[in-house]
Image (cartoon, grey):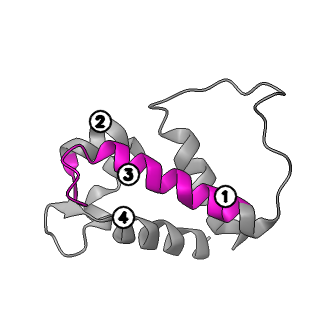
Amino acid sequence: MKRMLITVAIFAVSAGATAQTITPATAMPPASGAARLERGLQTLRDRFASANTTHDGKLTRQQAAAGMPMVARHFDEIDTQHAGFLTLAQIEAYFGKKALSR
């Protein structure tokens, strides 16, 4: 679970599409592992929704490149069905497996 948190955090931070300065007024208080995981997953869901400009639940290679660069770099590995698009569930599963294999 800790590796999943780290992977989700790295994923959210490394995408770099939207930088935000955190000040003491906007900083989140320390949270439990489950709360951090949920925040990380929510960030992933939000980034997916933002990148999915067609709002069809499918992220194309071009949408990934524009809004989720880390996903774009691993697109072919995540797209195991060779469908030409990714779903949120596929992305979550891929990064979950990556975290467990470390």
Q: Is residue 85 above or below residue 54?
A: below
Q: Are marks 4 and 3 in contact (CB under 8 Å)?
A: yes
On the picture, is 62 further left or further right than 5? left
Three-letter residue code for mark 1: Ile
Residue 63 quadrant = top left
Image quadrant holding the C terminus, namely bottom right
Label pair 1/4, CB-CB below 8 angstroms: no
Residue 6's label in the rendered image is 1
Comes first in the chain, label 1 or label 4: 1
Q: CA distance from mark 1 to mark 3?
A: 18 Å
Q: Nearer the viewer, residue 86 or 49?
A: 49
Q: Position of residue 53 (x, y in %)?
A: 23, 43
Quadrant occupied by the N terminus? bottom right
Q: Residues within 10 Å of mark 1 (few under 14, many from 20)?
A: some
Residue flagged by tag 2: what amino acid is it?
Ala
The range drawn in magenta is: 36-61
Residue at image coords 20%, 42%: 62
**Is disc 3 surrounded by few (<14), some (14 to 19) or many (20+) residues within 10 Å?**
many
Q: Earlier in the sequence, mark 4 or mark 3?
A: 3
Left or right side of 51 for 15: right
Pointer 2 residue? 66
Taking the image as drawn, is residue 23 in sight? yes
In the image, what residue occupies the spot 58% across and 69% down?
99
* Tag of residue 48: 3
Label 2: state its secondary structure.
Answer: helix
Place residue 41 in its image quadrant.
bottom right
- Which residue: 78% across, 66% down? 33
Element at label 4 = helix
Q: Which residue is mark 4?
A: 88
Tell me residue 15's x, y (percent): 47, 39
Lower position in the chain sequence, tag 3 or tag 2: 3
